[in-house]
């Protein structure tokens, strides 16, 4: 296209510019292998998410809307500023209670909304200090002191989705939230019975809070559920039976929640409490690492099979499936990590012209070749060799066990591990997944939505087992692995990144296929998914099912099994 | 020259119903998963893709297309040299957008490489640009006639069907409008070479030729032609680690003047 001289004097009818690249971001789950794991734990713990740590918010927000209704604050403009003030005041009370209490501050301010700002405010408080709430509750990004960015505070950012799922609030979003009757009201009334509600609301209106006020309102602290038996019962009913009656024998799923969801959540919570008890009996404290090992092997320390109660076996098996998928996810990420470490290796001359070229080089001459035996073997023969080296499934403490290998692999991938070692460890995990009879169930009883795996997340355990049962198993090992890693890692990454580019307009490519060959962008971290373990443990502590002593988890005064029908 | 222009954003503007694209190289994954998806979301339903036949073969070997035939039509262009025009025409009932530049229909071309584009819009407030779009459309017609012998007639008819979606373009073609302020020049078997078409509209006296390119002929013959037309030595922008040219000759020319 050529501009003529006449154009030069006129307005720019032709816009000439460099082509702007899409915004580059780090991104997550570059192979789409974490998503099935996230889907599984999401199914197993509906109503608790990775950002809903405190059970008290489940009753505090419904109570707040109950208060708004009583005051006739129906319109968003009326209640939204008060919601922020209330959220802010709730946080100040929690942090203040943490300061004045002799026990663990973990019970008070942990995972409370606005902690960065509000904990600092509380630290500066002295007797006689008066805090103006709106100095922190305002939503103005240009003004200092704002406690939280989201217009609807912690409700909008974290809790509205679960409160809606649990049938306590309704609306399209936090901005149109309404209290659900009778479930939300039942919880609100239960909460109200244990707190000086009128004083709290009066202080919101007054906008000025003293240290004395905060201390007087300590009943609002997230630790306060234990002191309010009615609220505790209602929350237990909600979590375990899906009703808000507070009646241990009340009907299941009266909140509008799907009864299957209630069932699976209650079983998960009861099983987790049971696992804590098992760990304590072994002299251990259940943390997420131990949880993964127990879930995967269904065995305690010393190869002792867990005597899981019969009614909890199905849920325990589903959590086992979750961890089985995690092993697969980490192994595939490990191979991707190792391959990417070779994209720009100095001394290789020109870049690899294609993903196939990199993958073939990797297994025939590169780090992959260093971990393969010299003798000509098929993939099947190599795997059979690995079978002899596998420790027994129950022995998760053995250095050769996949659960130990997995931890080491994550460490090496995210540190200065070498590609050959990373490759060897990844293959060990994949071999264990393929060879162990305990893993033959693959996804077992976990059900995905139709086409969830095939259409969106094609690299999964089902596909892995299908591929290894096919002709690839008889191929020479280097060629077979080159094919697998090209497809599972390199080509899949391109597809995943293209999908993200199409959907979000953002560039998450970790390596690029350019006209001159492959170019490394950045090696991503290898990451385990977070199965809401910390949040669930925190919620269980809040409702008295667990407690903590000297930093170790113990079973609390509430026996959740009694709440199961 | 303005700063940077996002072709991704252009694709989802809406108001367009047809898209004609010509390209030398092609990435089916990028086209189908990103471009097509974005355009479909924005309401573009009629897609014709003109691509160099040789490069099309390579693209097919890299990844089989999955939406070809029912979401878009592919028109491989068979010519002696490379089929090299990179034109994107988005056409709607009342508006049009044309992007002509160096961008192939690949991920690299749409942002990862350093690529240049020229964007022209037709609309109620810019009706004078209709002639430029008509010239571009004639380019597509000419390429199809000259290099599309292997294209089935039913697919070739898709080009004319485009006009039913944008009557303003049909009218501009019928009235034989030519562009007022700019020209769309293209080469095809039936046209003189591009340089021959450009020369008559160049000023007689050129202070300096400024250009950038990644590929140069091995004898730098065309650079010599430009040198002869330029009163002062041409200023040529290159990416030193990307350029494909006989290295020794660069000692006689300017070093990199434009940078990324």
Image: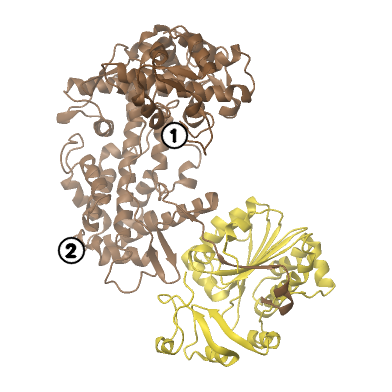
- In the rendered image of this protein, does residue A141 appear above or below residue A234? below
* Pointer 2 local density, CA inside 10 Å: few below 14, some 14–19, many at least 20: few
**Labels 2 and 1 in the same subunit:** yes
- Image point 39% across, 66% down: which residue? A518
**Callout 2: helix, strand or loop?**
loop
**Callout 1: helix, strand or loop?**
loop
- In this view of the protein, can residue A203 be seen by the observer? yes
The x, y position of residue B21, in whole percent, is 63, 67
Disc 2/disc 1 C-alpha distance (Å):
42 Å
> Viewer-proximal residue, A373 or A473?
A373
- Image point 41% across, 23% down: which residue? A265
The first of marks 2 and 1 along the sequence is 2
Instruction: Identify the chain drawn in yellow.
Output: B
Label of residue A59 in the image: none
Residue identified by numbered label 2: A374
Quarter-wise, where is residue A418 in the image?
bottom left
> Viewer-proximal residue, A313 or B86?
B86
Quarter-wise, where is residue A369 in the image?
bottom left
Is A282 on the left-hand or right-hand side of A161? left
- In the rendered image of this protein, does residue A29 appear above or below residue A378? above
Chain letter of disc 2 in the image: A
Q: Hey, which residue is sitting farthest front in the picture? A: A128
Residue identified by numbered label 1: A447
Number of marks in picture: 2
- In this view of the protein, can residue A55 be seen by the observer? no
The x, y position of residue B96, in whole percent, is 72, 62
The x, y position of residue B54, in whole percent, is 53, 76
> For chain A, what colour was chosen?
brown
Chain letter of disc 1 in the image: A
């Amino acid at each position: 296209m050529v501009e003529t001289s006449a154009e030069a004097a006129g307005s720019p009818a032709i816009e000439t510019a460099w082509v702007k690249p899409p915004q580059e971001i780090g991104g997550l789950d570059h192979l789409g292998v974490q998503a099935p794991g996230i889907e599984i734990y999401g199914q197993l713990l509906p109503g608790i998410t990775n950002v809903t740590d405190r059970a008290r918010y489940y009753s505090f927000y419904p109570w707040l809307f109950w208060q708004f209704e009583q005051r006739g604050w129906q319109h968003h403009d009326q209640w939204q500023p008060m919601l922020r003030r209330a959220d802010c005041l709730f946080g100040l009370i929690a942090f203040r209670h943490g300061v004045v209490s002799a026990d663990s501050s973990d019970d008070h301010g942990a995972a409370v909304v606005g902690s960065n700002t509000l904990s600092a405010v509380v630290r500066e408080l002295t007797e006689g200090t008066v805090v103006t709430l709106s100095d922190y509750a305002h939503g103005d990004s240009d003004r200092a002191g704002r406690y939280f960015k989201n217009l609807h505070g912690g409700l909008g950012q974290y809790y509205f989705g679960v409160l809606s799922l649990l049938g306590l609030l309704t609306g399209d979003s936090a901005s149109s939230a309404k209290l659900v009757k009778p479930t939300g009201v039942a919880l609100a009334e239960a909460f109200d019975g244990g707190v000086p509600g009128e004083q709290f609301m009066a202080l919101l209106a007054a906008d000025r809070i003293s240290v004395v006020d905060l201390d007087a309102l300590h009943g609002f602290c997230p630790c306060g559920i234990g002191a309010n038996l009615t609220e505790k019962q209602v929350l237990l009913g909600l979590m375990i039976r899906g009703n808000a009656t507070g009646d241990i024998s009340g009907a299941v799923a009266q909140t509008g929640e799907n009864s299957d969801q209630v069932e699976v959540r209650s079983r998960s919570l009861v099983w987790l409490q049971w696992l804590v008890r098992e760990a304590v009996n072994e002299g251990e404290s259940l943390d997420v690492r131990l949880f993964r090992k127990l879930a995967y092997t269904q065995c305690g320390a010393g190869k002792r099979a867990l005597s899981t109660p019969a009614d909890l076996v199905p849920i325990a098996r589903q959590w086992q499936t979750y961890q089985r998928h995690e092993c697969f996810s980490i192994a595939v990420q490990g191979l991707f990590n190792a391959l990417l470490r070779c994209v720009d290796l100095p001394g290789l001359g020109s870049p690899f012209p294609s993903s196939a070229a990199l993958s073939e080089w990797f297994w025939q001459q590169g780090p992959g070749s260093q971990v393969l035996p010299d003798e000509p073997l098929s993939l099947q023969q190599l795997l059979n060799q690995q079978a002899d080296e596998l420790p027994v499934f129950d022995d998760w403490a053995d250095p050769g066990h996949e659960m130990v290998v997995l931890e080491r692999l994550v460490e090496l991938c995210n540190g200065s591990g070498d590609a050959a070692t990373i490759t060897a460890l990844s293959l060990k995990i994949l071999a264990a997944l393929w060879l162990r009879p305990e893993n033959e169930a693959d996804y077992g009883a976990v059900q995905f939505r139709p086409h969830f795996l095939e259409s969106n997340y094609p690299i999964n355990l089902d596909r892995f087992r299908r591929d290894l049962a096919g002709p690839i198993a008889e191929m020479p090992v280097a060629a077979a692995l080159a094919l697998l890693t090209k497809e599972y890692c390199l080509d899949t990454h391109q597809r995943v990144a293209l999908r993200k580019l199409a959907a979000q307009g953002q560039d998450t490519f970790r390596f690029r296929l350019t006209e001159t060959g492959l170019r490394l962008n950045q090696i991503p971290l290898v990451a385990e998914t977070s199965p809401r373990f910390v949040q669930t443990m925190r919620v269980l502590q809040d409702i008295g099912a667990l407690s903590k002593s000297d930093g170790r988890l113990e079973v609390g005064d509430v026996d959740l099994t009694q709440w199961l029908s | 020259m303005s700063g940077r222009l996002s072709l991704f954003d252009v694709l989802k503007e809406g108001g367009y119903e047809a898209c004609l694209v010509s390209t030398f190289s092609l990435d089916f994954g990028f086209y189908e998963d990103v471009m097509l998806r974005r355009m479909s979301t924005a309401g573009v339903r009629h897609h014709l893709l003109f691509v160099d036949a040789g490069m099309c073969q390579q693209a097919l070997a890299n990844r089989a297309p999955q939406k070809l035939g029912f979401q878009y039509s592919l028109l491989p262009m068979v010519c002696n040299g490379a089929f090299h025009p990179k034109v994107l025409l988005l056409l709607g009932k009342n508006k049009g957008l044309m992007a002509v530049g160096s961008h192939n229909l690949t991920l690299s071309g749409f942002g990862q490489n350093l690529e240049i584009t020229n964007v022209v819009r037709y609309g109620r407030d810019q009706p004078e640009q209709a002639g430029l779009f008509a010239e571009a459309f004639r380019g597509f017609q000419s390429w199809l006639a000259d290099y599309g012998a292997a294209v089935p007639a039913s697919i070739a008819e898709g080009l004319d069907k485009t006009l039913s979606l944008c009557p303003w373009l049909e009218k501009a073609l019928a009235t034989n409008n030519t562009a007022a302020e700019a020209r769309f020049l293209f080469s095809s078997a039936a046209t003189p070479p591009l340089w021959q078409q450009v020369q008559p509209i160049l000023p007689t006296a050129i202070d300096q030729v400024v250009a950038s390119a990644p590929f140069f002929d091995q004898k730098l013959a065309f650079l010599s032609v430009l040198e002869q037309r330029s009163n002062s030595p041409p200023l040529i922008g290159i990416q030193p680690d990307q350029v494909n040219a006989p290295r020794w000759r660069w000692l006689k020319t300017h070093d990199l003047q434009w940078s990324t």
